[in-house]
Image (cartoon, coloured by chain):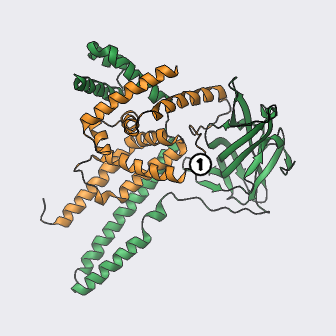
Amino acid sequence: MANEFDRILDECIDRINRGERLEDCLASYPEHAKKLEPLLQAMFDTQTAYTFTPSSAAKMAARQHFNIALEELVRRREERRSLFSWVLGWSRAWVAVAAVLLVALIGYFGLRPMLFPIGPSVQPSPEGNFVFLISDDVNAIGDFQNLNISISKIGLQAEGEDGQWIEFSPEVEIVDLTLLQGDKAQEIWRGDVPEGRYTKVFIYVSNVSGILEETGRSISVKLPSNKLQISKPFSVKSGSVVNFVYDVTVIEAGRSGQYIIKPQVGESGADRSFEKIDGED
Amino acid sequence: MSANPDNDKTGMRKLNEANLTSLYEEYYDKIARYVYTHIGDGSEAEDIAGEVFLKALESLKSYTERGIPMQAWLFRIAHNLMVDYLRKAVKRKTVSIDTVEIAGDADPATIVEKNMELERLTKAMDQLTQQQREVLRLRFFGELTSKETGSVLKKSDGAVREMQRAALEKLRNLLIVEQ
């Protein structure tokens, strides 16, 4: 009996995965509907809570890498076949030597260099053409004595569906948002990035810690994600320096006593006026 | 079968390459969703999903249809890559829920509500056994059949069906209590 119910439940899960409605599954097994429904509802709740749709850009980029890797694999196989056929005409000793050399070459050049090609490397430089600053748009920041965010990585994506990402580590890794309210902004990286048009920017936040003004108590602040990404186009041209202000804000989530940090797209960009500070009290 | 075993091997490899390529469109999304349920970071999940197919391409010569269908084999690779990722990321902050590209009009209250619902589900899932969680992930997000799930987990499909029922019953009871 239990096995039969398990089989029916399994079939319903397959049918729902294929796009059928829960009601249709229950209609197929009315004698089990009372027991089936809550379990299938739990399935829906789980799928809904973990809803995630991969971005088409990421999928396309990964497909490109895959296609390149496949082409390279086929090319090498063809080369090995033609080389091997040629070598087979030699004496046995020379065939063994050639085989060893071939294995060594394949091992040395490998597929690895083709995996996830990274954009051009960028280095910090005092004379750089690009400056990255952090600022705070005032919301609930007044509730905090201090609010430190740790930024471990910054990324810029060049224009275009398959635009390359440029990533670099900030020179200043921890900023206190209570010092950066309104127009105040702190420089965390300066250097040279390739000229061109960029459309997306992210910061990777590895840690957030704050102390509430009222209680002196430390509090955990939530993030929508470690990687906070915004779409904000800007251009880097020769002969000029771009100052990009990445603005975040901290808000209180309802009356839960919880706080959340989120990026402020509207207050971010290369065209923001700002008052530069050095982050010291 | 041809008289030349090398031709057979090459033929088999080309067939496997073609199968792997044909699985990409459908299974990239499923693998990314499956990984996301483990690590909670959409961007990393996308990266790992891409890496699964590259890894599969590298390991294709050792794959045979015997014992495990290719789509199930991809999830085994995904699981291994994910374990590596989690091992390296053990000190990283784990509160991330999703890589959300914040538009100017995104409602923070909706984000928090979604996060709270996810926390509720995650808390309930944490009380299942590891095998039960894995069965639900492969069935609901990987959309594998119970037989394919059994191939990944090295269990019979009968055992998978039993685990999936027990997991759903427990999950259902936990969610009622939480409400």
Compared to residue B76, the image places residue A26 above or below, namely: above
Mark 1 Cα shell of 10 Å, populated few (<14), some (14-19), many (≥20)? few
Q: Can residue A17 be seen by looking at this rendering? A: no
Measuring from the top left, give residue B72's x and y in whole percent. Answer: 32, 44
Left or right placement of residue A248 versus residue A83 in this view: right
Which sits in the foreground, A137 or B174? B174
> Tell me, what hue is chain B?
orange
Report the number of numbered marks.
1
Left or right placement of residue B179 versus residue B67 in this view: right
> Tell me, what hue is chain A?
green
Q: Secondary structure at mark 1?
A: loop
Residue type, numbered disc 1: Arg
Which sits in the foreground, A161 or B161? B161
Measuring from the top left, give residue B44's x and y in whole percent. Answer: 52, 47
Question: Can you say which quadrant of the picture contains the N terminus of chain A?
Answer: top left
Compared to residue A214, the image places residue B5 above or below, namely: below
Measuring from the top left, give residue B129's x and y in whole percent. Answer: 40, 36
Give the residue drawn at x 39%, y 33%. Answer: B140
Which sits in the foreground, A14 or B174? B174
Question: Which of the chains bears the disc numbered 1?
Answer: B
Measuring from the top left, give residue B33's x and y in whole percent. Answer: 45, 39
Give the residue drawn at x 62%, y 49%. Answer: A159
Q: Circle 1 is placed at which residue position?
A: B92
Q: Can residue B63 be seen by looking at this rendering? A: yes
Give the residue drawn at x 76%, y 53%. Answer: A188
